[in-house]
Amino acid sequence: MFRTLLLIGTGGFIGTIARYFVSKLNLTISFFSIPAGTFLVNVLGSLLIGFLMGLSERSVIISTDIRLFLMVGICGGFTTFSSFTMESLTLMHNGQVLQVLVYSAGSVLFGFLAVYAGYVISNLF
C-alpha cells in the first residue's frame, strides 16, 4: 500500500508542478477573457489520459504501477477541474456569463475530443 501511495504522490507532485507552469499562461495569453492556461491544462490532460488509457488496454507496456503513477498521479495532479470551476464562478461573479458558457462548453467539448484523440492515437502503436 505504501508503494502505491508513493507512486501516486510522486506522480501528483510532478503533475502539479507541470500544471503550475502551464497555468501561468493565464497571465500572458488572453483568449476571449477565459483562463487559457487552465483550459490548455484540461485539454492536454484529457489527451494524455486518453492516450494512456488506450495503450494500457492493448499492451503490457504499462504495468499497474506505471498506470497509477501516470494516470492517477501525473494526470490527476496536472488536470485542474477544481481550478476550472473556481474560475468559472469568478467569471460569473464578474458578470461574464457568455465567457462562462464558452469556457465551460469549450472545456467539456475539447476535453472529450482530446481524450478520444489520445485513445485513437494510442491505437497507432
Image (cartoon, rainbow, N blue to C red):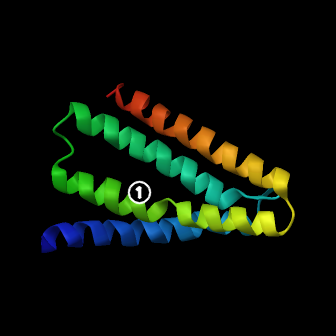
Say which residue appears at 21% left-offset and 45% top-offset.
62
| Image position, residue 96 (x, y; %) | 85, 59
18 displayed left or right of 21: left
Question: Could you tell me if residue 32 is visible in this image?
Answer: no
Q: Residue at 47% across / 62% down in the picture? A: 78
> Considering the numbered disc 1 on the image, is that residue within a helix, a strand or a loop?
helix
Vertical side of 2 occupied by 37: above or below: above
Where the C terminus falls, by quadrant? Answer: top left
Picture quadrant where residue 21 is located: bottom right
- Residue drawn at 50 percent across, 59 percent down: 79
Residue 67 relative to residue 48: left or right: left
| Residue furthest top as drawn | 124
Hey, what amino acid is under mark 1? Cys
Q: Mark 1 highlights which residue?
A: 75
Residue 5 placement, left or right of 27: left
Above or below: residue 75 compared with residue 123: below
Foreground residue, 62 or 34? 34
Location of residue 36 in the rendering, given as x and y in whole percent from the top left corner: 70, 57
Q: x and y percent of residue 49 in the render? A: 40, 46
